[in-house]
Amino acid sequence: MFKRILVPFDGSKGGEQALKKAAELAALCDAEINILTVYRHHSMLEASFSMVRATTPGNMDDAMRDHAREVAEYAKKQATEEGAPTVRAFVKAGQPARTIVRFATEHDCDLIVLGARGMGSVEGYLLGSVSHKVTGLAHVPVLVV
């Protein structure tokens, strides 16, 4: 049925539910799960207004990438514990919906499973959620949990 399932994961409750459902499907289909955590690039102007803890790198992009890696590794561990046979984790910078769809195409994913609501910004309420954008842009089936 499915061979490669993409799970965009941001650490939210919706992301957790999607990850669990994807792990169930992967176990049934003997499919590979690709976890993708996307972080947004911050401009120098945005970085100048941001608070960064003393223990994190001074560059905002480095801090965001490091956090995204932690989130992706956490998801990989969770999916494995839920019974997914093969799990890989990736981190990318970019606009979330377009990055997710591009990743699915580049890695021949045949299903995208994502949460209905993640940790989106106020911008998401005004312009539409990532899940809504992905369903409109994707060329493969999308399961919104």
Image (cartoon, grey):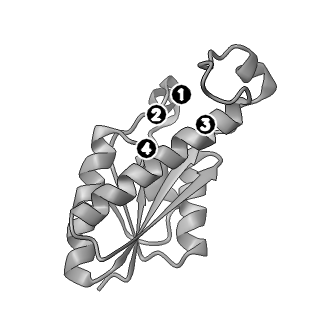
Q: Which mark is residue 16?
A: none
Q: Is residue 35 left or right of residue 107?
A: left
Query: Which type of secondary structure does the marked residue at label 4 adopt?
Result: loop
Assess whether mark 4 and mark 3 are in contact (beta carbons under 8 angstroms): no
Assess whether mark 4 and mark 2 are in contact (beta carbons under 8 angstroms): no
Q: Nearer the viewer, residue 66 or 133?
A: 66
User: Mark 2 = which residue?
Assistant: 120
What is the C-alpha distance between the residues marked 1 and 4?
A: 16 Å
Please state which amino acid type lies under the numbered disc 2.
Answer: Gly
Assess whether mark 2 and mark 1 are in contact (beta carbons under 8 angstroms): yes
Q: Position of residue 137 (x, y in %)?
A: 53, 59
What is the C-alpha distance between the residues marked 1 and 3?
A: 18 Å
Which circle, 1 or 2, is nearer the viewer? 2
Which circle, 2 or 4, is nearer the viewer? 4
Q: Which mark is residue 123?
A: 1
Q: Is residue 12 visible?
A: yes
With respect to residue 120, does 145 lie above or below?
below
Q: Residue at x 38, y 39 (%)?
A: 118
What is the C-alpha distance between the residues marked 1 and 2?
A: 8 Å
Q: Which mark is residue 64?
A: 3
Please state which amino acid type lies under the numbered disc 4.
Answer: Asp
Which one is earlier in the sequence, the residue at label 1 or at label 3? 3
Q: Would you call the spot at circle 4 few (<14 residues within 10 Å), some (14-19), or many (20 or more)? A: many
What is the C-alpha distance between the residues marked 3 and 4?
A: 12 Å
Please state which amino acid type lies under the numbered disc 1.
Answer: Glu
Q: Quadrant of residue 125?
A: top left
With respect to residue 87, does 58 lie above or below?
above
